[in-house]
Image (cartoon, rainbow, N blue to C red):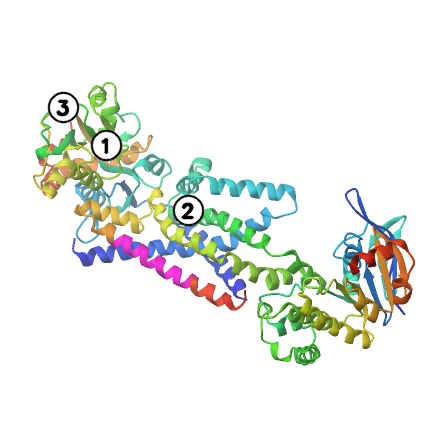
Amino acid sequence: MKLRKKLICAIMLVGTMAMSLTGCGEKKKDTFTVGFDAEYPPYGYMDENGEYTGFDLELAEAVCELNGWELVKQPIEWSNKDNELNSGSIDCIWNGFTINGREDDYEWSVPYVDNSQVIVVKADSGITSFDDLAGKKVGVQAASAALAVLSDEEGQKELADTFGELTEFGDYNTAFLELEAGAVDAIAMDIGVADYQIGNRGDEFIILDEHLNSEQYGIGFKLGNTELRDEVNDALKELKENGTFDELAEKYGLSDMTCLEFE
Amino acid sequence: MEYLSMKNIKKSFGDLEVLKDISLHVNEGEVVSIIGPSGSGKSTLLRIATMLETLDYGEIHYLGEAAVEIVDGFSVYAKAKKLREIKNNFGLVFQNFNLFPHYSVLKNITDAPINVQKRNKKEVMAEAMELLEKMGLSDKADYYPSQLSGGQQQRVAIARALALNPKVLFFDEPTSALDPELTSEVLKVIKSLAEQHMTMVIVTHEMNFARNISDKVIFMDKGVIVVEGSPEEVFNSSNERMKEFLGKLQN
Amino acid sequence: MSFEVMLEQLSSGMLKSMMIFFLTLIFSLPLGMVMCFGRMSKNKIISGITGFIISILRGTPLMLQLMVVYFFPYYLFGWSIGGWRFPAIIVGFSINYAAYFAEIYRSGIEAIPKGQHEAAHILLYSKPQEFFKITLPQVIKIILPAMTNEIITLVKDTSLAFSISYIELFNLAQQIAAANTTMIPFVVAAIFYYVFNLIVSVVMRGFEKKLSYYD
């Protein structure tokens, strides 16, 4: 008897699931799903109230308001970002997303932030230049732009080869803990992230004056999806003109880094 | 009336011929004991009679109904439905009791009559209690098999077999798994069944017991029936193999 | 973020983890039985195919299977997979766990002495009666300790849903930790997992006790 009840229950659940699936299968046009890494402040993260926010997400919100879309914030596992985008479960990757090196992989919006890859070390470590990194342990986020630069022959591969070890980590929180504990001597990352982390953690850490490279952030759309990209570009232009963009940049301390320009 | 007839039974396991053309007849109310050294094929014969094992060749009839017939030189089992009806005619008591450990004594006895034979629950319960009383186990109805001694378990197993009201009851070495001091309580029960003229086929190593209660004794060795007849005839037989077998047992 | 908000957030994550847990159990327990029958089938083709499927499911990482289940409708058929994320997790977890359960069921069924089947046969139980009245109750008792292990593992495995970006307890803890540069969410998450598993163990021990009326 019990088994039969369980079976009926299971069949009903499958039914509901199938229905909800077909229901969601037809994506309404007025939603705009942004894929982002929720562990990437100040661009995308969870705020005091447990809401997802950040410079990129607020900007996306403003774009949606302009275009009459409903914003869906979908945190994604970063290493799966291409699968998520190609399969249509997200409309774009909007998350301090570096254009350089990925120019041909996505339909890019106009670049809106000029970012650099930098090295963060402990203030009392005695490391002040790239030369001091020889033989040291350096951490870098898996699948990140910093890693791309450090593995690129035309980038900083030569420098990376002088490191004692290049280790990859999953999220910045762990990486800073490792740095603090001495498990790594330095971390390579975006300057914006570095500023945010050091702002939160105090002056125990410093950014080296030398930069690994200079790079730009854009919004990545699926190849071929120029229509959506153009709509977002137009909205960005309007937000730049009415001052919303600069207000947001100021709010998140990114004013020095913005580069949104239209011909 | 002839309750069981087995004719020309042959059975091999691979190259080993276990039964070589065995025939056996059991009449209503008869008690037949099968004795013989281990490996003689007596247990296999019992397993074929109860259809736990299929035969290679031969015929089996219960109360005149064919369970296995020879058709065009091949042995053919009856259709499933018919076979089920025929199987209703017999019960089997195993060497290792094979009680259901998750059922109480009472449920072990009553579950098949109620759920298989679809008989009236009250009636079955009353009958089961009667059976338990006969077995001297009235106070154990709510016990689980693991709480009982081997002798008690075997008596429950006999009650379980009797609850289905079989025409023929088979016993496969019913006391072999028991400590010697527990065998007598089981043998006593079987003896009382014999006195009530229950038709029984018993594979056993208990020679005195076989001699005392049997109407007919069959001595098997190496897949053939060597001697058969009344207990006196068999146990006093001048056959060499029979004498050797009894001699070994006495030592 | 205040501690209350964090607790509230993590509780909602816990709820999602529990959804995965319960739905996976509801589907994988019977599905495992089907796989087990396939595996034990007398038909060589059926048992061969089922055996192969089970070995793949047990021999590759669950995280990988989740990604395959989630993304394959798009890559194979070009279907949009919007809304498929949560169902994909349940499907992925259910078939993976069904494979493990199937092998546990099989070991349990094979542990039932032959004499039990022979007794059921002689007493003329039908095949379904024999399975549900004689075999299954005894199998459940035999496999309960192994099932407890597997179910406790499932509680912890729910965190693998992060691989296809389902925001459950562990993923949420990571996000809060990142935003607030603190380890506290991980401590809270650990306590949540532990308490849930404690409850699971107590429930399973209750079942074991209930079945200890016979040896």
Left or right? Give the position of B218 relative to C102. right
Residue shown at 61% from the left, 59% from the top: C131
Name the residue that disc number 2 marks. Answer: C88
Q: CA distance from mark 3 to mark 1?
A: 33 Å
Q: Name the image quarter holding residue C196.
A: bottom left
User: For mark 3, what is the residue?
Assistant: A130
Above/below status of C60 relative to B232: above
Residue at mark 1: chain: A
Residue C191 among magenta residues: yes
Considering depth in this image, is A122 or C163 the residue closer to the camera? Answer: A122
Residue under circle 1? Answer: A109
Residue at 87% over, 69% down: B215
**What subunit carries mark 2?**
C
Residue A220 to residue C84: above or below: above
**Residue type marked 3:** Phe
Q: Quadrant of residue C111?
A: bottom right
User: What residue range appears in magenta?
Assistant: C188-204
**Residue A8: percent from left, percent from top:** 51, 61
Is C126 situated left or right of A56 in this image?
Answer: right
10 Å crowding of disc 2: few (<14), some (14-19), many (20+): many
Mark pair 2, 3: CA separation: 46 Å
**Amino acid bearing label 1:** Ser
Secondary structure, mark 3, is helix
Visible in this render: residue A56? no
* Chief secondary structure of the magenta portion: helix
Residue C93 badge:
none
Horizontal and vertical percent for residue A28?
34, 46
**The C terminus of chain A: image quadrant:** top left
Horizontal arrangement in the rendering, residue A254 relative to residue B237 (left or right): left
Tell me the CA gap for discs 1 and 2. Answer: 31 Å
